[in-house]
Image (cartoon, rainbow, N blue to C red):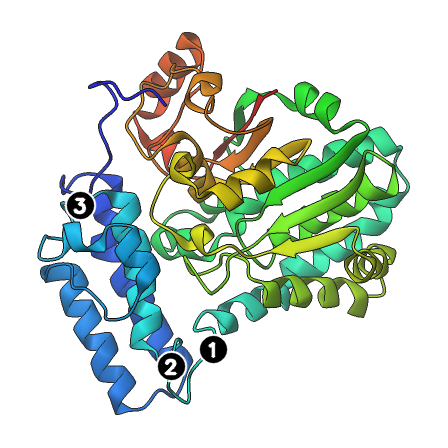
């Protein structure tokens, strides 16, 4: 992966930066929401209060007995400000510490209880999710080519439902928040992606968010299986709750039940595909790691190498795929993903500073119109492919 001085690792050290806002505003807001979502006892409240103080004003602290995080370099950052260490690392460590604070890893009566589950379930029960189910009947009447395009874009723009992102957007205009105004693809390799998927044996989809994003992801997989574009799909998930709304196995079950309870054919087909192995689930510990995919372990690399195409969904996976660096936007996507062991596509709504693969004209036009805000507002998206 290119590692030039022009592409520094992103941190939250600049108070005017997007990462600073995430650590200083989004994370404290999330702690308060989690605290209010469950009747946690005094011990959990004290732990959450301590995390709030540490994350805003303190320094990185280690946890005992976490072999994965020791391997991922926690010792190198202990005692340093959260705002000075790599942003990808500090964000990931925050969520690991949050789960520890609520007793997720036990031993505790709260062991295994997803602190974000009320938010995820409320999203699936909302009017937007019901309207999307109703739209499936209309979509079924369209030609297959129109269906697949609609489902691809549904999967792409579904990332706007990201619960963590909406925490920071709550005070902004509603149209800006959901991306219905000024929505734009800044890169579109959809044609290349369809050629890769046509007759592929195995699709690996690295999922991002649960709820209203995961549903269109599953609908896209169902369409690809139904029409013979792929023979099987492997869905990579998080092994435990992460980044507020990142999808776990439980979230897949909830999403499929959401479709089956609504009486959809897609829900019944997805349930059958999971049961007979045409869709399989993976939950590798590295999926909750603070490192780029360039540092993935050998067993995960073998999973990706065995796929005909891997699709990385969402902003976080994009940051890990290309490296969480301030790349010049015209840095070729095919170069920063050259290490990846097979064809790899990115479907991403832009919600962070990282971007590659733009043309000079596109970069200049966006900067002139919006400054740097287009990188983080969630109103722009991309489909990029390295065949």
Foreground disc of the pair 2, 3: 2
- Mark 2 and mark 3: span between their CA atoms? 28 Å
Q: Which mark is residue 85?
A: 3
Q: Provide the residue designation for mark 1.
A: 112
The answer to whether any part of residue 100 appears in the image is: yes
- Mark 3 and mark 1: span between their CA atoms? 29 Å
Quadrant, the N terminus: top left
- Mark 2 falls on what kind of element? loop
Q: Residue furthest front?
A: 298
Q: Provide the residue designation for mark 2.
A: 106
Quadrant, the C terminus: top right
Q: Is residue 306 left or right of residue 92?
A: right
Please report the residue visible at 35 percent of the width from the left and 31 percent of the height from the top.
354
- Mark 3 falls on what kind of element? loop
Name which of mark 3 and mark 1 comes first in the sequence: 3
Above or below, 193 against 11 in this view is above
The answer to whether any part of residue 351 appears in the image is: no
Above or below, 199 against 231 in this view is above
Please report the residue visible at 28 percent of the width from the left and 48 percent of the height from the top.
89
Count residues near mark 2 (Cα–Cα under 10 Å), then give few for <14, some for 14-19, many for 20+. few
Place residue 3 in its image quadrant.
top left
Name which of mark 2 and mark 3 comes first in the sequence: 3
Position of residue 287 measured from the top left corner of the image (x, y, whole percent): 46, 51
Position of residue 104 measured from the top left corner of the image (x, y, whole percent): 40, 76
Count residues near mark 1 (Cα–Cα under 10 Å), then give few for <14, some for 14-19, many for 20+. some
Count residues near mark 3 (Cα–Cα under 10 Å), then give few for <14, some for 14-19, many for 20+. many
Q: Is residue 288 left or right of residue 227?
A: left
- Mark 1 falls on what kind of element? loop
Name which of mark 2 and mark 1 comes first in the sequence: 2
Q: Quick check: marks 2 and 1 in contact, CB under 8 Å?
A: yes
């Amino acid at each position: 992966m290119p590692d030039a001085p022009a592409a520094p690792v992103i941190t939250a050290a600049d108070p005017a930066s997007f990462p600073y806002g995430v650590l200083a505003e989004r994370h404290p807001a999330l702690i308060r929401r989690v605290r209010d979502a469950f009747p946690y006892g005094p011990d959990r409240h004290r732990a959450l209060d301590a995390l709030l103080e540490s994350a805003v004003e303190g320094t990185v602290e280690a946890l005992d007995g976490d072999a994965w995080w020791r391997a991922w370099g926690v010792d190198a950052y202990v005692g340093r400000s959260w705002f000075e260490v790599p942003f990808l690392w500090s964000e990931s460590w925050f969520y690991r510490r949050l789960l520890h604070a609520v007793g997720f890893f036990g031993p505790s009566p709260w062991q295994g209880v997803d602190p974000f589950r009320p938010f995820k379930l409320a999203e699936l029960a909302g009017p937007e999710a019901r309207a999307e189910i109703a739209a499936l009947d209309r979509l079924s009447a369209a030609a297959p080519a129109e269906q697949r395009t609609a489902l691809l874009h549904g999967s792409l723009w579904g990332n706007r439902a990201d619960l963590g992102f909406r925490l920071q957007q709550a005070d902004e205009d509603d149209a800006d928040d959901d991306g219905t105004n000024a929505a734009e693809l800044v890169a579109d390799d959809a044609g290349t992606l369809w050629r890769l998927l046509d007759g592929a044996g195995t699709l690996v989809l690295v999922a991002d968010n649960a709820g209203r994003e995961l549903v269109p992801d599953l609908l896209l997989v169902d369409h690809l299986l139904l029409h013979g574009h792929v023979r099987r799909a492997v869905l990579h998930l998080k092994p435990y709750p992460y980044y507020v709304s990142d999808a776990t196995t439980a979230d897949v079950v909830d999403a499929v039940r959401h479709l089956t309870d609504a009486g959809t054919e897609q829900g019944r087909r997805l349930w059958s595909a999971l049961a007979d192995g045409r869709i399989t689930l993976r939950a590798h510990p590295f999926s909750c790691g603070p490192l780029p995919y360039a540092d993935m372990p050998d067993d995960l690399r073998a999973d990706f190498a065995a796929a005909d195409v891997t699709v990385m969904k969402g902003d976080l996976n994009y940051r890990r795929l290309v490296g969480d660096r301030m790349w010049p936007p015209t840095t070729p996507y095919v170069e920063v993903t050259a290490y990846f062991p097979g064809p790899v596509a990115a479907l991403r709504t832009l919600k962070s500073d990282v971007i590659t693969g733009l043309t000079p004209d596109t970069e200049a036009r966006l900067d002139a119109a919006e400054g740097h805000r287009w990188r983080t507002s969630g109103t722009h998206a991309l489909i990029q492919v390295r065949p």
